[in-house]
Amino acid sequence: DVKVTQSSRYLVKRTGEKVFLECVQDMDHENMFWYRQDPGLGLRLIYFSYDVKMKEKGDIPEGYSVSREKKERFSLILESASTNQTSMYLCASRGLGRLSSGANVLTFGAGSRLTVL
Amino acid sequence: AQKITQTQPGMFVQEKEAVTLDCTYDTSDPSYGLFWYKQPSSGEMIFLIYQGSYDQQNATEGRYSLNFQKARKSANLVISASQLGDSAMYFCAMREGMDSNYQLIWGAGTKLIIKP
């Protein structure tokens, strides 16, 4: 019954390394999101994608890029990891449904906890 | 200014007691929606309940209900008869407007611990 899968639960990387975080959803959702979660700050949106090959910057895109070549897959890329990117990263997807019912809610993956040394 | 405020960073509650988690919001858009999510220690965010600004009745989903007070701009989550498995982080979030490609605005969360 897995719906949104994040490839890595825990990663430890060195400063300057290139990091790929992969997210796959099996619900045929149009929208996909990458969030960063830090204690006391809630969730902050990094990037989102409305559809294949489309991407939009969120609130904190600096230091990140994304790729969406297929509808089911949305990748987050840290070109050169830094210690201030140590965080929990959450991927989510959402279909298009009636707003009034709240039916098009976000479905999240289990998260990827990244530590940059 | 914070658009979503959760004033309780942490709460301890005795098992079987009811719990109220506070959420206040700020928007000038007449059309909005409020969401509550639960995040257990496993990390996955789980959708609990939704309330639309035009909904006449307070939303309920099993043991979860939303105490929606529009004039006070509050949307508190009420958990009846708490269980040990309710221990988790709880997040309130809001969407503004009617764009189906909406973005959510998140609160900082409340950590709830249920004591046996």
Image (cartoon, coloured by chain):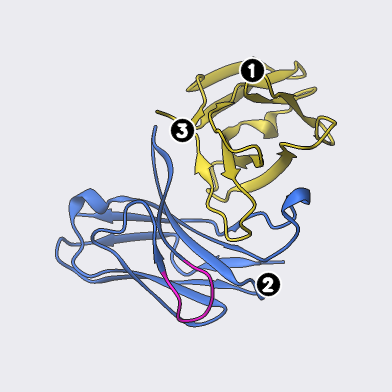
Percent position of residue B5, x then y: 50, 26
Question: Label 2 amino acid?
Answer: Met
Residue, disc 2: A27
Q: Is residue A57 left or right of residue A32?
A: left
Crowdedness of circle 1 by 10 Å Cα count: few (<14), some, many (20+)?
few
Which one of the lettered chains is coloured yellow? B
Where residue A64 sits, quadrant-wise, is bottom left
Q: What residue is shown with label 1?
A: B72
Which quarter of the rendered picture does the C terminus of chain B lie within? top right
Q: CA distance from mark 1 to mark 3?
A: 20 Å
User: Which mark is in front, 2 or 1?
Assistant: 1
Q: Residue B114 or A95: which is nearer the viewer?
A: A95
Q: Amino acid at mark 3?
A: Ala
Q: Secondary structure at mark 1?
A: loop
Q: In the rendered image, which residue does mark 3 sit on?
A: B108
Subunit of label 2: A
Q: Secondary structure at mark 3?
A: loop
